Each structure stands twice: as C-alpha cells, then as structure tokens.
Amino acid sequence: MVEVSTSILSIKEGEEQESFLKLETAKTDYFHIDVMDGKFVEKNTYKKMLNNSFYIKRISNLPLDVHLMVEDIKSAIDDFLAIEPNIITFHVEACKNKQEVQEIIKYIKDNNCKVGIAVKPNTKIEEIYEFLPFIHMCLIMTVEPGKGGQAFMTDMLEKIETLKKHLTEQNLEVDIEVDGGINLATAPKVKKTGANILVSGTAIVLAKDFKAIIDELKK
C-alpha cells in the first residue's frame, strides 16, 4: 500500500488553516514538514515550519513526517520533538562521521520517535546500508534539497531500485520514501521501483481538488 506525505512547503501564507483541513479531509497520510536552516540548504523555513507544526498539532491528529535539512541536527530534533512527530528524518551528509549517525539514530529512538535517514542525489545509497537495520525509513531525494517545485531526476530511479533489492535480500522492513518532483507523471515510475511513501507538495497544494490527486498518487 502506497502512502502519501504532503509537503506543506508550497502552501500560501494566510491559507494554512483551510489547506491543512482540506488535506486531512482528502486523506493525506502524513503532513511532511520541510525544515531548512539556511546553512545546510539555501532556504530557511525553520521558524515557519515550527509554527505550522504546532498549529497542525492543535487542529489535526494526522502524523507529522519531519524532514530535517539542517547542520545542527541535535538542536532541531529537540525543537521538533515538542510536536510529537511520527518520524524525524535527518541527512547523512550533515553528519561528521558514522559514530554521529549512530548517536542521532539512538537519540531519536530514545525519545519515542521513529527515525529516518535522508540521502541527497549525489550520495551513493550504499553509504547508508550499515544503518538500515536500526532505522524505520530511508528518504531518497530525487531533487536537490532546499527548493520546492524542481524537476524529478530520472536517474534516481536506479537508486530506489538498488535500495529495494538490498532490503529484500537482507529481509529488512524499512520504508522507502521518495521526495522531489513527485506528481501524476513521475509517481508510477517511483512506485514501480519500490517506493512506498511518496512526498508530494506542489502537485497537491496547487491543484483544485486535493483528494483527486492524493487518490491518484496512492493507486
């Protein structure tokens, strides 16, 4: 069963309440929270995403899927644990060494939260194989993180396929989430290669009918 995590990055200012309620009615599976610090990536959405997360928590019971694109991972985890997210995903590229990756995995799990590791397009998927037995999800970026509305990188399909094959061979239950340029044209290819959680932002929030798009993505 494919799930949809809707990125709230492209929601217009002043339309948050209406959009969040419409997304819940449209049965998105998660709210995807894109947290950027202006250092690890160019854009800075930190304060906005924290405020929106607290607001969503007040009006909705849907799980929050927090994607940290930050240099100071530990501080961001502490800030976003307050919203009781379902999962916190951090970038392996933001870590100094393998020991730090393991420490962050343990820290998130010790705070009763699921943990995911994200990889940028240029990062080889094999670099995170050793961490897969300890995490719940791997997030494969199919665009460069930090900007919404980018075009899907088709050469990332092979990376998804490679990860899926490895997980099957090792008998590991790890979700494969794909983020970047996901729409009705790219979703079938991504699902075919093994992804089971699709992050979509502009394709959903810019549509007139959220439910029609979400239903189509889940098929």
Image (tube, rainbow, N blue to C red):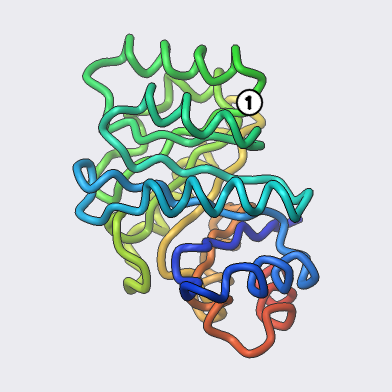
Amino acid type at mark 1: Cys
User: Which of these two is toward me, 163 or 84?
Assistant: 84
Give me the residue at 74% from left, 51% from top: 62
Q: Position of residue 200 (x, y in %)?
A: 53, 66
Give me the residue at 41% from left, 63% from top: 180
Give me the residue at 76% from left, 72% from top: 26
* 64 shown above or below 167: below
Q: Position of residue 9 (x, y in %)?
A: 45, 63
Q: Position of residue 23 (x, y in %)?
A: 70, 69
Image position of 27 (left or right of 181): right
The quadrant of the image that shows the N terminus is: bottom right
Give me the residue at 60% from left, 12% from top: 110
Residue indicated by mark 1? 113
Quarter holding residue 93: top left
Residue that sits furthest to the bottom in the current view: 208
* 96 shown above or below 202: above
* 96 shown above or below 144: above
Figure disc tally: 1
Quarter holding residue 147: bottom left
Image position of 153 (left or right of 130): left
* 111 shown above or below 199: above
User: Which of these two is toward me, 28 or 16?
Assistant: 16
Judge the density around disc 1: few (<14), some (14-19), many (≥20) Cα neighbours within 10 Å: some
Image position of 212 (left or right of 141): right
Q: Position of residue 187 (x, y in %)?
A: 55, 70
User: Which of these two is toward me, 218 or 115?
Assistant: 115
